[in-house]
Image: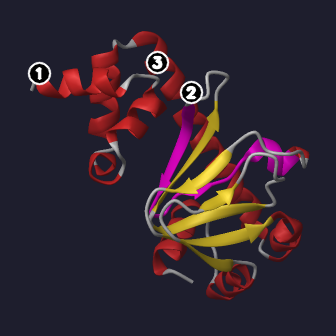
Amino acid sequence: MNPDLIAYIKRFVDISNEEIDIFNSYLKPKELSRKAFLLNEGQVCKSRYFVNSGCVRLYYINNKGNEQIIHFAIDNWWITDYESLINKTPSKLYIQAIEKTSLYELPEESFDALCEEVLNAERLFRKIMEKTYVAIQKRIEYIYSLSGEQLFETFISANPEFTQRVPQYMIASYLGMSPEFISKIKSKK
């Protein structure tokens, strides 16, 4: 198991080395090339994914045919389509690698068994969900309360690594802006 994943888990819960080994036994390593899909619209999402290294995006195609990015995941972040995963319904979303990406896949079919064997696993994923919910709540708050320029500046200051790894048009999609608007903001500096 990636030492970063072990450190990540230990940030949230107490876990023994034996439990780390058990946790690891449920994970499947996966490699994605740049632009490869982890999930396509219409597929049922069957796993949670931990990004060891790389960058992926979760997005949908809106009714105008444009990509609308909902979420990014970079090194040491989890990503999945929770609606499809939990409800076992076809996904309306895509998960795609932005760059070459190394992941661990945690299949949902073995999630309950993992939680039975590693008692703090369920607590870990609850904490991940809480953290994710807070981030979504903040994003919605910022979208409604900040100007476009303030929203962009807040996002970049909180996530500086994205400017180096994610194309500007994808950041624009995530923030609900046009790439041209972001270019105007950047040209003011």
User: Which numbered tag is attached to residue 143?
Assistant: 3
Q: Which residue occupies 27% across, 37% down?
A: 157
x%, y% of residue 30? 62, 76
Residue position for label 1: 188
Residue position for label 2: 137
Is tag 3's residue or tag 2's residue first in the polypeptide sequence?
Answer: 2
x%, y% of residue 12? 57, 60
The image shows residue 84, relative to residue 125, as above or below, that is: above
x%, y% of residue 151? 35, 22
Considering depth in this image, is 37 or 1 the residue closer to the camera? Answer: 37
Give the quarter of the figure containing the C terminus.
top left
| Left-right relation of 88 to 145 | right
Q: Secondary structure at mark 3?
A: helix
Q: Answer whether labels 1 and 3 touch (C-beta < 8 Å).
A: no
Magenta part of the chain:
67-86
- Does the magenta-highlighted stretch encompass residue 42? no
Q: How has the structure been colored for display?
A: secondary structure
Q: Secondary structure at mark 2?
A: helix
Considering depth in this image, is 90 or 2 the residue closer to the camera? Answer: 90
Q: Amino acid at mark 3?
A: Ile
Q: Amino acid at mark 2?
A: Gln
Q: Amino acid at mark 1?
A: Lys
Q: Residues within 10 Å of mark 1 (few under 14, many from 20)?
A: few
Q: CA distance from mark 1 to mark 2?
A: 29 Å
